[in-house]
Amino acid sequence: MTKTTDDPTIGRLVADVTRDLSAIVQHEIALAKSELKVSVRAGGLGIALIGAALFLLLLVLILGSVTIAYFLTMTGLHAAWAFLIVTGVYLLLAVVLGLVAWTRFKKVSVPEKTIGAARQIPSALSPGPTPGQRVKGARRA
C-alpha cells in the first residue's frame, strides 16, 4: 500500500488546528469587543442621565428650601429667622445622618476567621517533614 499525497501529516494537522483555534479566538475577541461597545455606550448614556437627574434634584432641594423659608415668612417671621430655621433643620439632619453612619462604621470588623485560614495555607501547601526530620516543637524520647 502506498501513501498518497492527499493524506495530511500530523504536523500539518497540528498546524491546521492551531490556525483554526487562533482564528476562533480572534473572532470571539472581535465579537466581545463589539458587544462591549454597545454596552458601554448604553451604560455611559445611563450614567449621564442619572447625573443630570441628580443635578436637577439638587436644584429642587435648593428651591424647595427657599420655598419653605418663604412660607415661614408668611406666618409673620422675619426672613432671616425663616432661612436660619431651614438651615438649622438641614444641619440637624446632617448631624443625625453622620451619627448613624458613625455607629454603622464602628460595627465593621476585620475578617479574623478568613485571615486565620489564609495564614494556614502556606503551611498546608508545604511538604510535611520527612521521616528523619524533627518536627519543630516536638520532644525527643
Image (cartoon, rainbow, N blue to C red):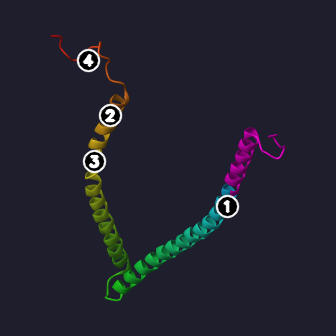
Residue 66 vs 33, above or below: the answer is below
* Of pointers 4 and 3, the one earlier in the residue sequence: 3
Image quarter where the N terminus lies is: top right
C-alpha span from label 2 to label 4:
19 Å
Prevailing secondary structure of the magenta residues: helix
Q: Given the image, on which type of amino acid does mark 4 rest?
A: Val
Q: Given the image, on which type of amino acid does mark 3 rest?
A: Ser
Q: Observer-nearest residue: 79 or 24?
A: 24
Which stretch did the figure color magenta?
1-27
Checking the image for residue 119, the label placed there is: 2
- Name which quarter of the figure residue 85 lies in: bottom left
| Residue 98 in the image, given as x and y percentages of width and height | 31, 60
Q: Given the image, on which type of amino acid does mark 1 rest?
A: Leu
Tag 4 residue: 135
| Residue 13 in the image, given as x and y percentages of width and height | 73, 44
The residue under the point 68% across, 50% down is: 21
Q: Observer-nearest residue: 22 or 53?
A: 22
- Name which quarter of the figure residue 89 lies in: bottom left
Which of discs 2 and 4 lies nearer the camera? The answer is: 4
User: Regarding mark 3 in the picture, which secondary structure is present there?
Assistant: loop
Other residues around mark 2 within 10 Å, as few (<14) / some (14–19) / many (≥20): few
Tag 1 residue: 31
Classify residue 59 as left or right of residue 68: right
